[in-house]
Image (cartoon, helix red, strand yellow):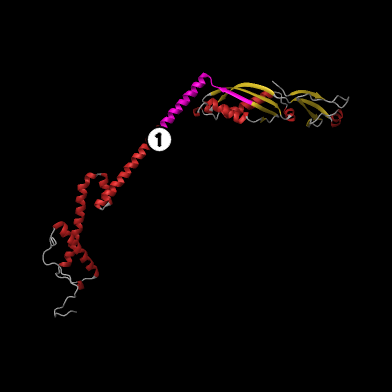
Amino acid sequence: MTSPITRRQELSRLPLQRRPVADPGTTLVFITRRGELVGAEHAFTTGEVWWRGYRTVYTVDTRPHGESFTCRLPAKGDALYFDATVTYDWLVQDATTVVHDQVTDAAGSCREYLIKEMRRICRRVDPINGDPVEQAERLIDIELGQTGIRLANGLSIGSLHAALNLDPDQAGIAKDLLIGTLVHQREEMTARSNSGVEDIRQSGDLRRKRERIEFYEELVGNKMLANVLAEDPGKATEIVQLTFSMEQQKRDKAIQAMQVIIDGGHLQIGDLDPAITAVVSQFTSLVSQINSTVTGEPQIAGIGGPQPQVTDAPAANETGTVP
């Protein structure tokens, strides 16, 4: 145990005493009769000591002191532990605070602080992210070793170095963790690769299906039937028959509608309103298509008798005059 306070001396006003003198590497801290702490910024004379009424003086060691210790530090999740050998220097940064807190074990105070901080740092070290010893030493050096540390009790820590290692059992655990992580990463990469291949395959299937639908839609002129053909081209014969049947039903309905109109014999444009005239024109065109593509004859199949005669002139009445 190393105490930075090396001497305590009581002072009295009478008889007069020789003034206290700080040795090299030390400083003096005085306590007044009211209990106030005063650091000696310069060497007081005997008169100053008497006049100010100091009753106690402490001699504080301000030289740097080298220390070392060993400890065990846990990694993340307490999966494994490091054996650490730590070296550092401590010195008094604020002698007044050291006297106020009555620091008697400087090395113990520094060791307690460093172990707490190094535990906090090492618990962030994940063994599966690489060499755990290298990670821990690098973090400790960055956070504690590269800058001086000032403690609340007036001490400061510098020249910190931590050497960490794993015993054989801990090294085996670290190796197993790393191997397990690599296997898991490989499985994840394989799964992602397989998923990517499947996505490409499905994308190709969808694209080819769209192309088949567009092709069949151009042939049959019906998107719903094109979807059926794209799913099962074997239904092509059935689709063609259905399409032909639907077209034949349209023709039959047109013929039946016009049959009502032509049953009266000759028709004239003047006898028809514009709607009927449009139907007649559509019927004439449809009949021409039916005759050329279905029967190949100029007559309408199934309808006998004279064909309707449509003229542009108005019909004459019974007296032979045109109204």
Q: Residue at x 57, y 28 (%)?
A: 138
The x, y position of residue 156, in whole percent, is 68, 28
Neighbours of disc 1 within 10 Å: few (<14), some (14-19), many (20+): few
The x, y position of residue 61, in whole percent, is 74, 24
Residue 168 highlighted magenta (yes or no)? yes
Q: Residue at x 68, y 25 (%)?
A: 90
Relative side of 171 to 299, left or right: right
Q: Residue at x 69, y 23 (%)?
A: 65
Residue 279 highlighted magenta (yes or no)? no
Relative side of 235 to 72, left or right: left
Residue 219 higher or lower than 24, as above or below? below
Report which quarter residue 276 is drawn in.
Answer: bottom left
Report which quarter residue 209 is drawn in.
Answer: top left
Q: Which residues are magenta?
A: 160-189
The x, y position of residue 238, in whole percent, is 20, 48
Q: Secondary structure at mark 1?
A: helix
Question: As drawn, which residue projects farthest toward the left?
Answer: 305
For disc 1, the marked residue is: 192
Query: Which one is nearer the viewer's eye here, 296 or 121?
Result: 296
Relative side of 100 to 270, left or right: right
Q: Residue at x 16, y 59 (%)?
A: 292
Report which quarter residue 160 is drawn in.
Answer: top right
The quadrant of the rendering that contains the C terminus is: bottom left
Q: What secondary structure is the magenta-colored segment mainly?
A: helix
Q: Amino acid at mark 1?
A: Arg
